[in-house]
Structures are given as C-alpha cells and as structure tokens.
Image (spheres, helix red, strand yellow):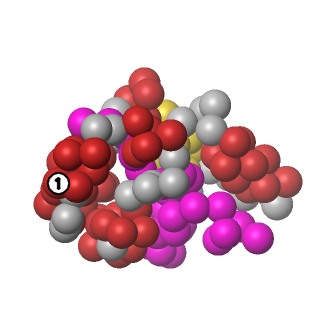
Amino acid sequence: MKLYGIPNCDSVKKARAALTERGLAHEFHDFKKAGVPESHLDAWLAAAGWEVLLNRKGTSWRALPEATRDAVVDAATARAAMLLQASLIKRPVIEWPDGCITVGLDALR
C-alpha cells in the first residue's frame, strides 16, 4: 500500500496514523521531495476524476490568480496544474493493495 501526500498536511498525518493504528503497512511518497509521478497521476485521474483529485478548497488553489483558476476546465488542464503544483492534489491519495485508489481522508473513517 502506498500513501501519497505532503508530510506536514494534517489529513496526511491523520491517514498515516490511522493506517499504523490498524496495523496496515504502507509506504509514504512525499510530493515535496519526490514530486508527482506522472503515470500515477494519470491513473488517479482515470480512477477518481479530475474534479475529485483537484483540491479547490486549499490555500494553494485560492492563492492562484483568478485567470489561472478559470483556465482549469477539464482533466488535461487540471493535470497540468497538478504537475506544476503538487499541493493542488487533494490529499492523501492512497493506492490500496487491491488496486483501488482513494482520495481524501474519508476512505479511512
């Protein structure tokens, strides 16, 4: 199992703690240090959809110029934005052993 995110994100911290608490071994991929793997981003977009994966509630999104936000209108433009700024990806993204992909903390509740 692999968990993707940013280590100082509260949702990522909670997810890592919940997985550990449940005895679920997991590997952590730090977007800040290792970047966003493009092939994985494509799989996440296919599985969850760009509107789920793009975090429009976060400070990174709100800090973007309005014209930049308005230009994100589909999977291709969302993908480009997320590759440029990993903090636009809703966290955590978890790749489960069965191949399922979940986005956000709700999957662990």
Residue most extreme to the top? 33
Residue 56 location (% of width, % of height):
44, 56
In this orientation, which residue lies closer to the viewer: 41 or 49? 49
Which of the 4 quarters of the picture holds residue 53? bottom left
Does the segment drawn in magenta span residue 77? no
Q: Along the horizontal axis of the image, is 50 left or right of 27?
A: left
Q: Residue at x 45, y 55 (%)?
A: 55
Q: Quadrant of the N terminus?
A: bottom right
**Residue that badge 1 annotates:** 71
Q: Which amino acid, by three-letter code, is at mark 1?
A: Ala
- The residue range painted magenta reads 83-109
State the image coordinates of residue 4 (x, y, percent, origin top left). Answer: 50, 47
Q: Nearer the viewer, residue 37 or 25?
A: 37
Query: Could one spot residue 56 in this view of the protein?
Result: yes
Name which residue lies at 20% across and 65% down.
73
- Left or right, 76 with reference to 28: left
Residue lying at 85% horizontally and 54% vertically, measured from the top left = 21
- The vertical placement of 86 against 3, above or below, is above
